Image (cartoon, grey):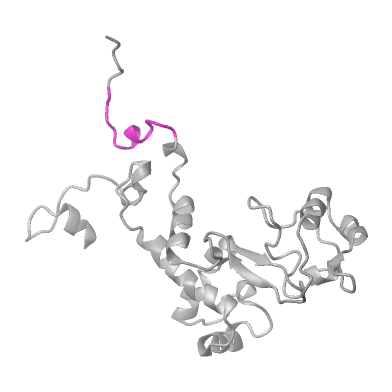
Amino acid sequence: MINSFWWGSNRTSGRGINWMRWEKLAMRKEHGGLGFRHFYGFNLAMLGKKGWNLLTNHDTILSKVFKAKYYPKMGFLEATLGHNPSYVWRSIHASQVVVRRGLKWSIGDGSKINVWRVSWLKDDENPFVTSAMIASSEELCVSDLMQQNERKWNEDLIHQVFNERDAKEILKIPISCTRDEDTPIWRFSNNGTYTVRSAYYQLMEVIIDNNHLKVEGEWLKIWKLKVPNRVKI
C-alpha cells in the first residue's frame, strides 16, 4: 500500500516504478536514504516498550499474568517462548533482543544481577564478563562479590574468579553506601528511560548495514550516479 502511495503511476492499477529497495529507502537521510519508516524495526521497537515494562514494572496486572504463565521462576530476559504461546507473548518475547541490547544496571545491593548472564559492566562495547564460568557457580550474583559489612568489593575473590579484564572492570564500579535495589537503566537515553525512538535508532544500525555509507561520497554508489572526476581549472 505504501509502495503504491509513493510510486503509483495511476489510480486504477496503483503500479509504478520501484526505484530502490525499501531497505535503502529506510536508511537515514544523512546516509543517503530517504528516512522512510522501516516497519519491522519500528514494530520491534514498540514491542520492546512492552518488554521493558515487564522487566521494570512488576506491579501491573499484565506483568503478573505473563510472569505467572510464562516465567514464574525467572525474569523476563531469561523467559523462553514455551509451549503453545499466545500471539501476544510470542510478539513480546521477540523484543528480548532489543531490551537486552540497551539494558544496563545501576548496582545497589547486587542481589538481582546474575554475574554471568546479565550485562552489568561499565564497558559500553562489551558489558558482559568474558571469564569462563566456574562449575557450580551458575547462580552467582554481584552481591556475592561484595563484602557486605564494609560495602566494598571482595578483591581477593574477584581476582580469583575473573580474568584480568573483568576484574579491572568490576573494581571500577562504585558501590553505593546505601542498600538500594538494583535498577535497570536504558543505555540509549539521557534519563535512562526506554523510548521507542531511541530503540528504533539503534535497531536501524543493526538491521540496515550503514557501514559502507560512512565514507564521504559513498552514498553516490548507492544511487548508482556516475559523477565525473573534478577537473582543475
Outermost residue toward the right?
156
126 sits to left or right of 57: right
Q: Is residue 43 above or below residue 211?
A: below
Q: Residue 151 magenta-drawn?
A: no
Residue plotted at (47% across, 82% down): 86
The span shown in magenta is: 215-227
Q: Nearer the viewer, residue 97 or 60?
A: 60
- Residue 95 screen position, x and y as percent: 51, 68
The quarter of the rendered structure image containing the N terminus is bottom left
Q: Residue at x 52, y 82 (%)?
A: 84
Give 12 or 102, whichever is nearer the viewer.
102
Q: Is residue 137 above or below residue 33?
A: below
Confirm whether the magenta stretch covers residue 226.
yes
Residue in the image at 69% along x and 56% along y: 122
Tell which of 7 and 118 is nearer to you: 118
Q: Residue furthest front?
A: 177
Q: Position of residue 35 (x, y in %)?
A: 32, 51
Q: Name the image quarter holding the C terminus.
A: top left
Is residue 193 left or right of 30 when viewed as pictured? right
Residue 44 visible in this rendered orientation of the protein:
no
From the top left corner, tell me how far across and down residue 39 is, in percent. Answer: 35, 62
Residue 58 position within the rendered picture, expressed as x and y whole percent measured from the top left: 59, 84
Q: Is residue 55 above or below residue 45?
A: below
